[in-house]
């Protein structure tokens, strides 16, 4: 029995175990499964692709960020974060605007995992987005990434109308040691 048989068996325990033995040579079948009409098959295919550090797997996941199924988008967003794929920044930034707060939070977490390559886009979102929720997620991501190039944007965000944006701007600046005075007692 192949790992793909276990992955798509309908038995969650077998599928979970199969994730540990899926390899790059399974990419064509996983890509086909990601396009399947069976939502469970698509979900497990996305989970498997997220574990493969391969450009083709990342490309398949990137294509699935626009899928209408929110459950599939959730696993895809999480998977892109686990892959730390710089090429995922644009669709992840787009997902910050998702109507689902949960999916927007997953996109934020994924951007945090991507790290510094996400900072320019997050800075633009923090400075220009009309939605406070998007600005707060951008500020949170910038605070947790801790890239010094975000300092000017975080300083500006201290005056944002949203208390959450202000909180994360303050948190980020504090984490980077900006504005703190150290003294020896």
Image: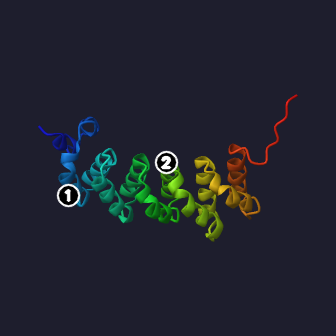
Is 88 on the left-hand or right-hand side of 101?
left
Q: Quick one: 130 or 116, which is closer to the camera?
A: 116
Q: Is residue 132 above or below residue 146?
A: below
Label 2 crowding class (10 Å Cα cut-off): few <14, some 14-19, many 20+?
Answer: many
Q: Is residue 78 above or below residue 13?
A: below
Q: Is residue 65 above or below residue 170?
A: below
Q: CA distance from mark 2 to mark 1?
A: 27 Å
Residue highlighted by disc 2: 113
Going from the N terminus, do you reach mark 2 or mark 1 first? Answer: 1
Q: Nearer the viewer, mark 2 or mark 1?
A: 2
Q: Residue at x 61, y 53 (%)?
A: 142
In the picture, which quadrant includes the N terminus? top left
Q: Residue at x 39, y 48 (%)?
A: 83
Is 19 on the left-hand or right-hand side of 119?
left
Q: Quadrant of residue 185?
A: top right
Residue highlighted by disc 1: 32
Is 166 on the left-hand or right-hand side of 13?
right
Label 1 crowding class (10 Å Cα cut-off): few <14, some 14-19, many 20+?
Answer: few
Q: Residue furthest top?
A: 185
Q: Residue furthest right?
A: 185
């Amino acid at each position: 029995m192949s790992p793909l048989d276990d992955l798509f068996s309908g038995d969650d325990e077998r599928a979970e175990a199969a994730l540990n033995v899926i390899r790059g040579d399974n990419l064509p079948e996983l890509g086909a499964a990601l396009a399947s009409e069976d939502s469970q098959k698509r979900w497990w295919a996305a989970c498997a692709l997220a574990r493969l550090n391969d450009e083709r797997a990342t490309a398949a996941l990137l294509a699935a960020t626009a899928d209408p199924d929110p459950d599939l988008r959730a696993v895809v967003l999480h998977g892109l974060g686990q892959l730390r794929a710089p090429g995922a920044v644009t669709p992840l930034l787009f997902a910050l605007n998702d109507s689902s707060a949960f999916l927007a939070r997953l996109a934020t977490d994924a951007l945090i995992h991507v790290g510094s390559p996400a900072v320019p886009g997050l800075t633009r979102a923090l400075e220009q987005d009309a939605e406070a929720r998007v600005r707060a997620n951008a500020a949170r991501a910038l605070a947790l990434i801790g890239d010094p190039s975000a300092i000017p944007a975080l300083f500006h965000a201290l005056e944002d109308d949203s208390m959450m944006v202000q909180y994360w701007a303050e948190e980020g600046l504090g984490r980077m040691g900006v504005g703190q005075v150290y003294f020896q007692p």
